[in-house]
Amino acid sequence: MKLKLALITLLIAASASAMAEPKQERMSTELESSIEKLDKINHLPNLLPVIIENSDFIGLTKAQLTELNQWRDANREAMLAAMKQIALKRVAIRDAAIAPTVSSARLQQMQNEIFRLQREVLQYKLSCRDHIVRTFNQENWTNFFIVLADEGIGVSVPINYAVR
């Protein structure tokens, strides 16, 4: 009898852990998918990785590149953490929206938290943009627009650069 009880307990524990793994895997996949979607719908493009990758062509000096790398080192992790939180909260609100026990007021609170995090990411991106604007010279801008056109990022070149 004790052997049967131990076997049943073992089977229940094994099936519970087997069920938890796909749920965790599904959550991870949903999180990655949500982060990708956030990146695609973002109104401000991620310019710094493109700039750093093409720093030679853009003509950045060592000092300019150091300044941009310092901004990235100081802000990247916090910005990525906020983006991850947005993705997690998007999955949570989606799941909560179909739960009959979750009130509309709670869903609104959850959405407001997402909005707060989106504003936080926007502040990081605007800070990065301001840093780029202060760091670049005229030649950097011209070469940068050539890189953007080549990368197909979908950013249109301002008229005053396009006619040169």
Image (cartoon, rainbow, N blue to C red):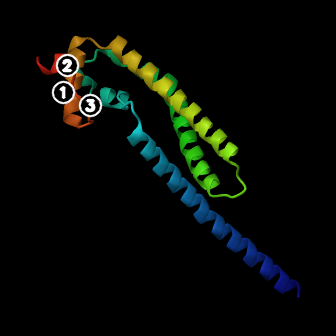
Q: Position of residue 130 (x, y in %)?
A: 40, 16
Q: Is residue 57 visible?
A: no
Q: Which of marks 1 and 3 precedes in the sequence?
A: 1
Number of numbered discs: 3
**Disc 2 residue crowd, few under 14, some 14–19, many 20+, Cα 10 Å:** some
Q: Is residue 86 left or right of residue 156?
A: right
Looking at the figure, which quarter contains the C terminus? Answer: top left
Residue 124 in the image: above or below residue 81: above
Q: Position of residue 22 (x, y in %)?
A: 58, 65
Decide: marks 1, 2 in contact (CB < 8 A)? yes
Q: Which residue is mark 1?
A: 146
Q: Is residue 64 left or right of residue 141?
A: right
Q: Residue at x 67, y 58 (%)?
A: 99
The three-letter code of the residue at mark 2 reads Thr
Q: Residue at x 28, y 24 (%)?
A: 55
Residue 4 in the image: above or below residue 69: below
- Residue ranking furthest to the front: 104
**Disc 3 residue crowd, few under 14, some 14–19, many 20+, Cα 10 Å:** few
The three-letter code of the residue at mark 3 reads Val
Q: Is residue 24 left or right of residue 131?
A: right
Please tell me the numbered disc located at residue 142.
Answer: 2
Q: Is residue 159 visible?
A: yes
The three-letter code of the residue at mark 1 reads Ile
Q: Which residue is mark 3?
A: 155
